[in-house]
Image (spheres, helix red, strand yellow):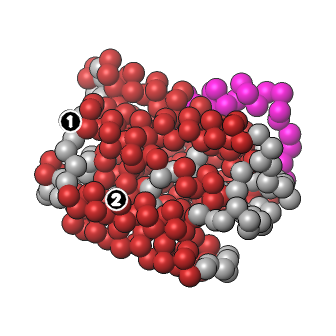
């Protein structure tokens, strides 16, 4: 098992900051890319482009893995990125980028609940309180989203985003084990590879639904940003950070994603944020912070790392 290495906190915090900024930018970018692409085509092209870059990085690092490890990677790739990004991209057609990013921020709290139920991990009273707060915030935002632009479809959109969050939760539980056996690059390379195998036949069937002549410069620029920035750079940065830092540190940083997303969505997409969005988002971020924050004096058990990358 790998030990948590915090010998160079500057590199760790820099990597986390880079990942959070790029992921925060990804929510308005997805809105822009969907002006020219369908959800299936966007997800497939995003990860096909990223996998080419990951493949170049893997040329000198390739090694034969056991079948059991490949099975875990295949299951991981099914839930994340395949199901996660399909559900997220379809959901974002029916809700705002701001609401989507806030709901995704609840992932660490929901993951903690799943880890307690499935892995029998112990939660302190403070962590239980944080999980409950996260769930309350999710209910407030998902069920009573007051963003006027999506008043008629926000429940559907937010529900799909929540299903995406559950997919990411399954991924985090599997990644918790694999991070002790594989490098960040190996995990990222194989999870994307298996995702492409799942998506290829669906993409071929639905490629005729894409109006390629309507693909504009904005959607193409957003796609390239999502491939290079929000996928390649952000994935590697965050996976590097979680290989060196405890899950609590990495998870708390994720609270910055909705902040970046809300600000950019207001600037780029002219989205207005409602009162209930603010209330629900504040409750979610507070709950996640309580769930993931640990006192420095407490040792983090070996292997207790995960990610959303």
Q: In percent of the image, x 63 and y 59: which residue is there? A: 248
Q: Position of residue 3 (x, y in %)?
A: 84, 55
> On the image, numbered disc 2 is attached to which residue?
281
- Observer-nearest of 220 and 148: 148
Question: Residue 161: image x %, image y %?
Answer: 37, 57
Give the extent of the magenta segment: 46-66
The answer to which of 282 and 33 lies nearer the viewer is 282
Local crowd size for mark 1, using a 10 Å CA cut-off: few (<14), some (14–19), many (≥20): few
Residue placed most toward the observer, 53 or 71: 53
Secondary structure category for the residue under label 1: loop
- The residue at the point 64 percent across, 46 percent down is 191
Magenta region's main secondary structure? helix
Q: Is residue 220 left or right of residue 211?
A: right
Instruction: Give the image location of residue 260, x and y in percent.
Output: 40, 40
Q: Circles 1 and 2: CB distance less than 8 Å?
A: no
Position of residue 79 relative to residue 43, above or below, is below
Residue drawn at (64%, 65%) of the image: 294
Horizontal side of 172 relative to 154 (left or right) equals right
Instruction: Tally the marks.
Output: 2
Give the x, y percent position of residue 256: 46, 47
Can residue 48 be seen from the camera position used here?
A: no
Q: Which residue in the structure is indicated by mark 1?
A: 270
| Residue 49 located within the stretch drawn in magenta | yes
């Amino acid at each position: 098992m790998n030990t948590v290495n915090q010998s160079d906190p500057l590199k760790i915090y820099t990597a986390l900051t880079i990942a959070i900024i790029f992921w925060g930018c990804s929510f308005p970018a997805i809105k822009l890319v969907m002006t020219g692409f369908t959800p299936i085509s966007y997800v497939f092209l995003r990860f096909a482009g990223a996998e080419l870059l990951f493949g170049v990085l893997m040329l000198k690092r390739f090694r034969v893995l056991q079948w059991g490890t490949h099975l875990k990677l295949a299951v991981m790739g099914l839930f994340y990125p395949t199901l996660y990004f399909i559900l997220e991209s379809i959901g974002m057609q029916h809700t705002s980028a701001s609401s989507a990013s806030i709901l995704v921020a609840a992932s660490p709290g929901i993951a903690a609940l799943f880890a307690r139920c499935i892995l029998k991990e112990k939660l302190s009273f403070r962590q239980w309180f944080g999980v409950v707060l996260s769930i309350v915030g999710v209910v407030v935002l998902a069920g009573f989203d007051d963003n006027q632009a999506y008043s008629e479809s926000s429940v559907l959109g937010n529900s799909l985003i929540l299903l995406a969050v559950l997919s990411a939760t399954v991924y985090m539980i599997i990644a918790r084990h694999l991070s002790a056996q594989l490098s960040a690059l190996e995990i990222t390379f194989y999870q994307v590879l298996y995702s492409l195998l799942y998506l290829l036949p669906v993409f071929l069937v639905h490629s005729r639904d894409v109006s390629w002549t309507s693909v504009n410069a904005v959607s193409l620029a957003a796609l390239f940003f999502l491939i290079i920035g929000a996928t390649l750079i952000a994935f590697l940065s965050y996976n590097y950070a979680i290989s060196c830092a405890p899950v609590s540190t990495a998870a708390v940083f994720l609270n910055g994603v909705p902040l970046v997303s809300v600000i950019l969505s207001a600037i780029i997409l002219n989205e207005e944020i409602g009162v209930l969005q603010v209330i629900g988002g504040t409750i979610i971020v507070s709950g996640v912070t309580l769930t993931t924050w640990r006192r420095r004096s407490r040792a983090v058990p070996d292997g207790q790392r995960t990610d959303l990358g």
